[in-house]
Image: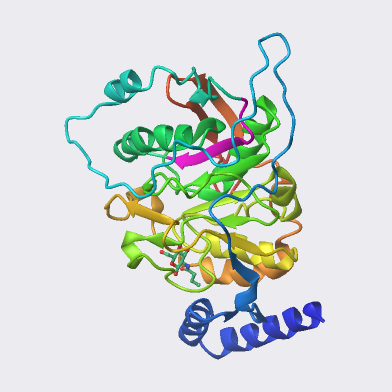
Amino acid sequence: MVKLKVVSGLLAVVVYMVLSELAFLDYIQKMFHSPKNYGVEISRQNYMYEHYVDTHLTKGQNKSQNKEVLPLCPNTSPLLRGPINLTFPSELTLANVQQKYPQVELGGRYRPLDCEARHHTAIIIPHRDREHHLKFLLYYLHPFLQRQQLDYSIYVIHQAGNYTFNKARLMNAGVREALQEKEWECLFFHDVDLIPTDDRNIYVCGSHPKHAATAINKFGFKLPYDTYFGGVTAFTPDQYRTINGFPNNYWGWGCEDDDIGLRVYLAKMRVLRPSLEVGRYDMIKHGHDKGNTVNRLRSKYLVNALENWKRDGLNEDMYEVISWERLPLYTNITVNVGTPAGLHPPP
Ligand code: BGN
């Protein structure tokens, strides 16, 4: 039934394409701003608001072996503060941030000292030329995650070279690399310019993929459209494998997040969201980066996603590691993701 709807949705889109490119773009844009979208109907019920703490993945394990056995951390951290106001001190340097958080281990790893963490989360941040944003994100994210009493590590996946940015490829690379280090139970995909401002937005996974950035200042602290799935999202490794990771072929800005949202739907999963009160983020203002121009082909790729998602994703080898460094506040993994012509296109 869903297949039939998808096929008829696709047919409709193709007819639009033939009629006029402009009309097609208009059609896609409208699809995205209503719950009836992707040519298949996604009901509002597909998006569920969750309570502050989703303890779905809580396990009663206690892994301390040689060391003294610590009690499990409480279900709800007593350190949470709720909403905070951000400031961006101009004199702040990465070295200052490092000095402020001496308890963070090399590679940006942290575990609570007085209790055994219930949750183990890898934060994956795609990056290029945004050191200024990264500094402020690290400044706020480390204490935010520590107040949640998580066992976590921060991985910054840096795209080498000057070719157009490919965020989705960096995400797939980040997952593979992070999982080689530890069997993380939750993967958080985090835009570098988004700072969470309410620590009740717990960075743990749930029984469905999660969209954490529900209320960004840039969009007036509400969703820009019902099916928005950008900014900060989270998957368990199994959920991520089920959608075959992220698509590899979106070069430049836009739509890869819509594609992932579509994959979640096609894989018959739902989306968990914190409430608008809790899922709040401040976006650090910036213009479009030179190396991340708007992708004019994005809507066409999205239509192809319906037939490509099982073929194009995590299952393909689309990157190579150039360097892996454990820095004091994060693990810096630099990767070559090549160009549409391959990993090593002729010059
Ligand atoms: C949407 C973009 C998203 C982006 C949000 C918020 C597209 C699809 C057009 C068919 N989607 O419009 O990628 O995250 O805006 O900026 O452009």
Q: Is residue 298 left or right of residue 199?
A: right
Residue at screen point 65% across, 71% down: 46
Residue at screen point 40% across, 68% down: 222
Name the spot of residue 145 as percent of width and height, x first. Answer: 47, 36
Q: What colouring method underlies this structural image?
A: rainbow
- How many marks can you see? 0
Residue at screen point 46% across, 27% down: 330
Corner quadrant of residue 119: top right
Magenta span: predominant SS is strand
Start-end of magenta stretch: 116-127
Name the spot of residue 151 as percent of width and height, x first. Answer: 58, 30
Quadrant containing the N terminus is bottom right
Corner quadrant of residue 262: bottom right
Is residue 345 visible in this depiction of the protein?
yes
Examine the rendered structure and indicate whether residue 95 appears above or below residue 339: above
Is residue 340 visible in this depiction of the protein?
no
Examine the rendered structure and indicate whether residue 227 appears above or below residue 280: below
Q: Is residue 206 left or right of residue 218?
A: right
| Front position in the image: 65 or 325 | 65
Residue farthest to the top?
Answer: 66
Name the spot of residue 142 as percent of width and height, x first. Answer: 42, 32
Residue at screen point 56% across, 80% down: 35
Residue farthest to the right?
Answer: 1
Name the spot of residue 102 as percent of width and height, x first. Answer: 39, 17
Query: Is residue 212 found inside the magenta-colored segment of the image?
Result: no
Query: Is residue 124 found inside the magenta-colored segment of the image?
Result: yes
Residue farthest to the bottom?
Answer: 19
| Front position in the image: 305 or 204 | 204
